[in-house]
Amino acid sequence: MVTAVGGHGGYPGGKQFVSAEELREKLSYLRHEKALIVKLVDIVDFNGSFLARIRDFAGANPIVLVITKVDLLPRDTDLNCIGDWVVESVVRKKLNVLSVHLTSSKSLVGITGVISEIQQEKKARDVYILGSANVGKSAFISAMLKTMAYKDPVAAAAQKYKPIQSAVPGTTLGPIQIEAFLGGGKLYDTPGVHLHHRQAAVIHADDLPSLAPQSRLKGRCFPTIMLCSG
């Protein structure tokens, strides 16, 4: 376990840190494995947390796209519109995915749908949870295991696995294997990929928790002024 990706955000680096390149190298073998990829994206920072070059990790393996933290959106948000916008954005990014799921690990919204998709598509493959740092992988895995535990004794036993949940990027050192499926196949918690363009790359560790919203966002509308000529 490490506390950060070295060389960014005011961290001095050293042996206890892992570089972004090393994290990519740790997952490069997936291109040659039969796996089901579950790619997580933070709805609060969609473009910032959208892990580019995902095929560098996944190869030709199928991808399920999971949007996290929808519970932080304003109360009157139309999730159908959000879903349509996400699909359009994914098409523009030229990423081919099996499906898109809007989820909240806090309220468990959408988690059952993701589990059903995984059970249908994994076909004895191992399942890898991928995403940028702080996208909510650990919370998502905990929510999955909690929901699966009602019907799957293997998942119930796997609940003893407590992913490290931290605001500091790179907390997970390498892929962590979890026995989570009764019908075979492993679940892997993977390192959060540190993206240099995100705010977390230039903020000190002590300030990172304040960047992530902890409660529902409030929408604000500003009046427009019509200017008439003549």
Image (cartoon, rainbow, N blue to C red):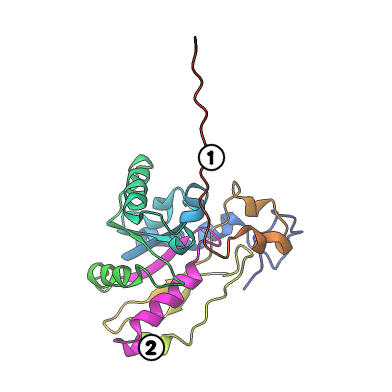
Cα distance between the residues tagged 1 and 2: 49 Å
Report helix, strand or loop for mark 2.
helix
> Mark 2 and mark 1 in contact (Cβ < 8 Å)?
no
Reply yes or no: does residue 153 show up in magenta. Answer: yes
Left or right: 172 with respect to 146?
right
State the residue at coordinates (52%, 77%): 163
Nearer to the camera, 113 or 124: 113
Reply yes or no: does residue 157 show up in magenta. Answer: no
State the residue at coordinates (49%, 61%): 72
* Kind of residue at badge 1: Phe
> Could you say which quadrant of the image residue 146 lies in?
bottom left
State the residue at coordinates (50%, 72%): 138
Q: Is residue 14 above or below residue 189?
A: above
**Residue 81 percent location from the top left of the image:** 33, 49
Left or right: 62 with respect to 14?
left
> Could you say which quadrant of the image residue 20 lies in?
bottom right
Report helix, strand or loop for mark 1.
loop
Residue under pointer 1: 222
Tell me the tag on residue 156. 2
* Kind of residue at badge 2: Ala
**Residue 74 percent location from the top left of the image:** 47, 57
Q: Is residue 175 visible?
A: no
> Magenta region: which residues?
125-154
Left or right: 85 with respect to 139?
left
